[in-house]
Amino acid sequence: MIRAIVKNELLKTVHRLAFWVVCIVFAFGTTMEYVEAYLRTLAGRSSFTLPGAWQQILSSDAEPLYIFAGVMLILLVANEFTWRTARQNVIDGLSKEQFFVGKMLLIPFIVLLFLGFRITLGGALAAAAGDGWVMGGPAWRALAGLTLAFIGNLAIALFIALAVRSGGAAMGVWLLYFALIENLLAEGLVRLSASFEPVVKFFPVHVFNAITRYIQHDPEAFQRAVASATEHHRDLPQIWDAGTLWLTAIGWVVVILGGAFVWFRQRDL
Amino acid sequence: MTAVIETEQLTKRFRRTTAVDGISFTVEQGQVFGFLGPNGSGKTTTIGMLTGIITPTAGRFRLFGSTTHRERVAARLRMGATLEQPNFYPYLTGRNNLRIAANVKGRTMRDIEAVLETVGLTKRAKDQFKTYSLGMKQRLALAATMLGDPELVILDEPANGLDPEGMREIREVIGRLADQGKTIFLSSHLLWEVERTCTHVAVLQQGRILRQASVKDITAGSAIAEVRGGPADRLRAVVGEYPGARAVRVEQGTVVAEVEQEDLSDLNRFIAERGVWVSHLALRQRSLEDVFMELTGGGEHGMGEVPQ
């Protein structure tokens, strides 16, 4: 049955105009970003070369990546309820569990698509601008962190899409949560009492942001950040204990996907 | 006979509303089972529970004797169903929409072409679903239902929104499926549609089954007299006084009553003696509509009338 589920999700996705629109807009934006960095490097005004460029490719500016991907996932999931095709899929013989698996499989598909494009293009241009492809341990760890954060953010988008069941409304809730709600909640709690400070850093988007920071994975980059902060009299950067951070991030992914499944399963279609 | 669908005290409550209230029925192999009731009587909710899109609040059901969740999921692959309006991906072609169902049911492109041919959609199969007329959408839904050669076919209001020609086509398809020995579970609020199509029937009202039997048994019994002449209310009152009349009601200006004897001369005399002159007096066979009116107390809302 898993083969049928994959075939169907692929069929639904590749024929969807909105999917290609989001892909093209994302590809255009990413290409512009890296081509500009590449050209600036050739002109001697920047150093977009490997391994240093991994920090830009795998860490900074990940929000547009999440937003594009989240919007795409919501479009692919929530409209199943607007068109009532979710119920038709179940009538056709899928169990609710199998339908959920189909939607969950969209997460690795989108991660591979978006991250693959970003890494291949960014890495290739940075390699061409410098001395070829170099990818050390910190870059691999940062890639793993970004992948997990990406999956986590998409899990939140999936949860919202399954709960709200309407494309427009789900996108609104997702963007609000991602950009505003969690930050406001965290800030409100900290203002209420400073004792909440150790708690709010465990909020999901906070955790996913922390695991995406390059200095979390590269001790040299961390030392440079500390030196820079000292020199400019800024607060010293903080990083998590790696084990705690990974466990927390994985835990959130499991909890969010589990919650989405339970919620979806208990509701009628 | 093998039971294909068995329900026991099946119940669905939506907050304070009980949509389906402890219904129990059995559909046996080869039956064309009509699930009859007015709009809002719980027909679609019952089908929703059978197809797995609605979780029952209480009670249980078996499809092909399945008892566990896993068995039920497997049993659903042996059935084809449509529920309310056809639900397909508007941006996909008719053919690609059928591919979705075919992949789940393990069917090939050849099967898809065969059902497209059966419902007469081959020429429009490459067009997007959103460009289809309602009749074409219904036919595509029927094609998806028939895909996989199901042993059990569940059709929820299949004639909804169709013109008389479309209704005739649907009846023919149902007839063909029945001839192939398939079990058909047909929900409808159109009494005449069920009477023409079904072998067995369950009458549902406000989430409860009022009666279930074969159509033959349920329509057997006393004859029905139709009387017209003078004001309907006055005529109804007079017929109501007649000792041999039961379940007297007015249907579109005609007084209808269940009578014990088929000779209507005595009734004619009885009415005339009370100063009412009859312009039409006829005996007809008891229809499903008559049974339904008796069961529901007459004139429940939303029931389809027999086309004139």
Image (cartoon, coloured by chain):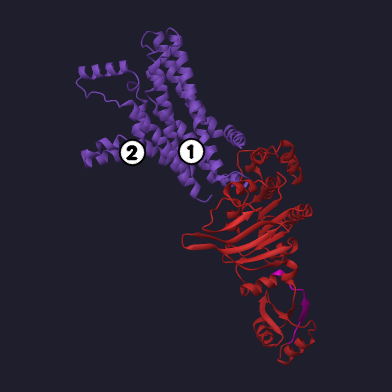
Same chain for mark 2 and mark 1? The answer is yes
Does label 2 or label 1 sit earlier along the sequence?
1
Q: Residue at x 62, y 43 (%)?
A: B130
- Horizontal placement of B33 versus A136: left or right? right
- Horizontal placement of B233 versus A21: left or right? right
Q: Residue at x 43, y 7 (%)?
A: A131
User: x, y percentage for residue A30?
Assistant: 45, 22
Q: Secondary structure at mark 1?
A: helix
* Alpha-carbon span between mark 2 and mark 1: 19 Å
Q: B85 above or below B17?
A: above
Q: For chain A, what colour was chosen?
A: purple
Judge by depth and name the residue closer to the eye, B123 or A72: A72
Residue that numbered label 2 is attached to: A182
Chain drawn in red: B
User: x, y percentage for residue A128?
Assistant: 46, 10
Region in magenta: B277-288
